[in-house]
Image (cartoon, rainbow, N blue to C red):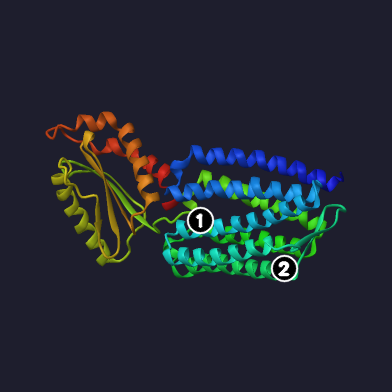
Amino acid sequence: MNLVAIILIVGNFTSVIFSSFIALSIFLKKEHFPTLILFILNILMVFLVGIFFSSLYTLSLTILFSPSINIALWKWAIFVFYLFLENGLFIICISQEDLKCLLLNIFISAFFLSMLMGALLAPDSILILSNEPLFTFYHADYIQFLLVLYSSSLIALYLYFTLIHYFLRTKNFPKRMVPLTILFIIPIITYLINVLYFPPFLILTHLFFIWFVNSFTMIIMLRNPELFFNIASNVYSINVYHRSGILLFSHLFNKINKKSKSTKWGQILIGLNHILSEFVEKSDKIDLLKTRDFEIIVKYVESHGIAILIIADRKNLILNKILDKFTQEFVKKFDQELLEITDLNKLINLSEFKGADELVKKHFTIYL
């Protein structure tokens, strides 16, 4: 066994261990993901590239089981790699809540994956040519043509789905997705060169690069999943109302420059404290108010007689989760102060709630 093969085997072992750790971390932090399907797709992403593709790719190139087994492993590596790329596109579509993107990707993936599976199952579609320094595979012309066409389509789709959101729907699209999309395109190109020309140095480069892209993406997603998913472009303010209608705390995120909007804003907030004072102790509560320009999300804490409002461009799951966490810590931090003012006759000291700014900075970092 030569040095290149040893490097690949050691790298694959490391990838399997590290990917298993990342998959476990995703499972333990599944509440970070807006939907169950995104949680499943991200775990699948780790398994597809960090464990399945890496192992199939490495074993087919480094260890001779038998020509037919090695060819089968290589074919499965090809299929799993493109399945991984399709999975990435589904994550983009679902995280951006784009139905057209999702339907288009379902159609394209079904077409190309079925074509690819049929081509790979054909006899003599792939053959082993040599084993120095790694096993080299010959791909029939129709396999090469299909892989070039499929890879080109995936590159176009990654660019299209990302750039159309970036340029046309910037307010809902996390800009950090643009460089990450480029990172996903580079392995497609290097893999295509590997399949067509098999330069040994690029085989190592491709595998190490795809290990890096997968690990880097998953680590960032675990730390800050909201950077990837669809978030409201602006959160304008967060307000905490006492059941008496008194505003206990308010934090303004983005200043409103136009005088007309400022007037409308003030009128809405004045009206809200009367509405909330009526509904905070009733079963039929308002939890969402919509206007042409923004939405007002309401979270009630009946045990402490308060309602927390977020005014944003629109409601979504990420914002709801941030609001839930903020509410829990707000109640915990000011538990004594809130319980003391459940008596409507007691004087309320608003300065006691100034410390809530720290909680805003902690939970709403991406909106500051």
Nearest the viewer among 365 and 93 is 93
Residue 95 point in image, percent of width and height = 46, 56
Residue 121 point in image, percent of width and height = 68, 60
What amino acid is found at the position of numbered circle 2 in the picture?
Gln
Residue 42 point in image, percent of width and height = 53, 49
Would you call the spot at circle 2 few (<14 residues within 10 Å), some (14-19), or many (20 or more)? some
Give the SS element for disc 1: helix
Q: Which residue is labeled 2 in the image?
A: 144
In the image, 95: left or right of 159? left
Residue 321 point in image, percent of width and height = 38, 45
In the image, 230: left or right of 65? left
Q: Is residue 334 above or below residue 150?
A: above
Residue sitting at x 62%, y 59%: 82
Nearest the viewer among 131 and 342 is 131
Q: Which residue is labeled 1 in the image?
A: 91
In the image, 230: left or right of 154? left
Would you call the spot at circle 1 few (<14 residues within 10 Å), some (14-19), or many (20 or more)? many
Cα distance in 3D space between marks 2 and 1: 27 Å
